[in-house]
Image (spheres, grey):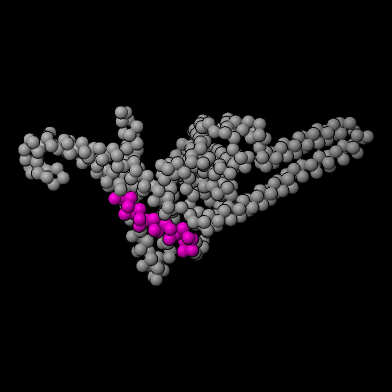
Amino acid sequence: MDLRPRLVASGRAIGHLAADFGIGLLALIAFAATLLVAALVPLGVGLVALPSLTSWTRTLASRQRRRIADLLGTPLRDGYQPLEGSLPHRIRVALTDPATPRDLAWLLVHGVAGTAAGYLALALPLFALNAVTVPLWWQAVPHASVLGYPIDSWPAALSGIAVGLGYGLLALVVPPPLATATARLGRVLLRPSGRERLAAVSAARAAALEAHELELTRIERDLHDETQNRLVTVLMSLGMLERSLAEAPEPARLLAVRAHEAASDALTTLRRVVRTIHPPVLTERGLDGAVAALAADSPVPCTVTIASFPRLPAAVETAAYFAVAEALTNLAKHSGAASAQVRLRIEAELLVVEVEDDGSGGALIVPGGGLAGIDRRVAAFNGRTVVTSPPGGPTMVRVELPCEW
């Protein structure tokens, strides 16, 4: 019998439960902090601290959702209302969002169950190791014992080997179903209700409409301020050319040159505007070819790693393309990076786009900035943008786009 698959499954489950142990301890701390904040609400201090604590709890819960999705192989959405804007608005969202009591219940349950399961998963192999090695150390340790039973003779020490093998067998058999059970419990606790999913879909639709309106406004502004003015210049130059042809050949030739240059500029601008609506390279070469072209044109040396996956819906590919384009533009302008990496892959029905550079760090999503544009476009698809950029770098922009439509 080949034990290798069982050993691999047990090792993976023990690793998952060990992480559950750490997250469980953090969950208990967060739950205690929530009770403290609730006690301070009458003093006003609790309300001020509530949005920050809610945000931290969401981060912890979102991390657990990704771990559950990795173990069970099914995505788990959060259904959160955006926690942004002014302090009064964030307080109102933290108090009224149905996800807040759901996350609070998860903190308590996982704090107890996750910690206990993680402790058991870690204890079994340690108990096995302790018992199996008793013959090596029992004489050097005063009052040696294994699980409370005194070891005071060689027969007792040798019997520890059998006990250790028993614990080893338990360590091989128990962790995989235990990890699955805790993951399923977490999925039940963290899964948004039907009302929350409906609210999330409505918010996503509203965000999509807003993003669409902003795109139309931007295109109209580009066409009006740039392309139209250049075409007006062409018309004026051609009119002057018509009047000058009968008077002086040389001025007419210069006006013709200027008209040609203005028309060429107008055509270039018009093509650029059209590319911002839907890049032709996506249709011609697909997402992988389009991203490779962006990396090749980047002033910062950039490597591209794209996992194999089929063509995605055009809207998803377009959003991913513009996310990469804006991220590369942003890092070229502000990061001072010497190199960058672009990675695309599918994870649990999500298209994951990562753009990482070795620049100076400190990147933030601020209103009106390039990263905010990425976040707004991705949010329209009920996706998520995460920017990790500590001072000194490196910076990574991670975009997650649902790709099952």
Quadrant containing the N terminus is top left
- Residue 404 is one of the magenta-drawn residues: no
- Residue 201: x, y in percent? 57, 53
Residue 253 falls left or right of residue 341: right
- Residue 97 is one of the magenta-drawn residues: yes
Residue at the far bottom in the pictured view: 42
Q: Nearer the viewer, residue 328 or 382?
A: 382
- Residue 225: x, y in percent? 73, 47
Residue 146 appears in the rendering? yes
Provide the major secondary structure of the magenta segment. Answer: helix
Residue 318 appears in the rendering? no
At horizontal 34% and vertical 47% (from top left) the residue drawn is 20
Q: Nearer the viewer, residue 13 or 396?
A: 13
- Residue 247: x, y in percent? 92, 35
At horizontal 41% and vertical 45% (from top left) the residue drawn is 68
At horizontal 42% and vertical 54% (from top left) the residue drawn is 189
Residue 32 falls left or right of residue 75: left
Q: Choose top left, top right, bottom left or bottom right for residue 173.
A: top left
Residue 367 falls left or right of residue 270: left
Quadrant containing the C terminus is top right
Query: Which residues are drawn in magenta?
Result: 94-116
Residue at the far left in the pictured view: 153
Residue at the far right in the pictured view: 246
Residue at the far front in the pictured view: 1
- Residue 350: x, y in percent? 52, 42
At horizontal 17% and vertical 39% (from top left) the residue drawn is 163
Q: Nearer the viewer, residue 82 or 347?
A: 347
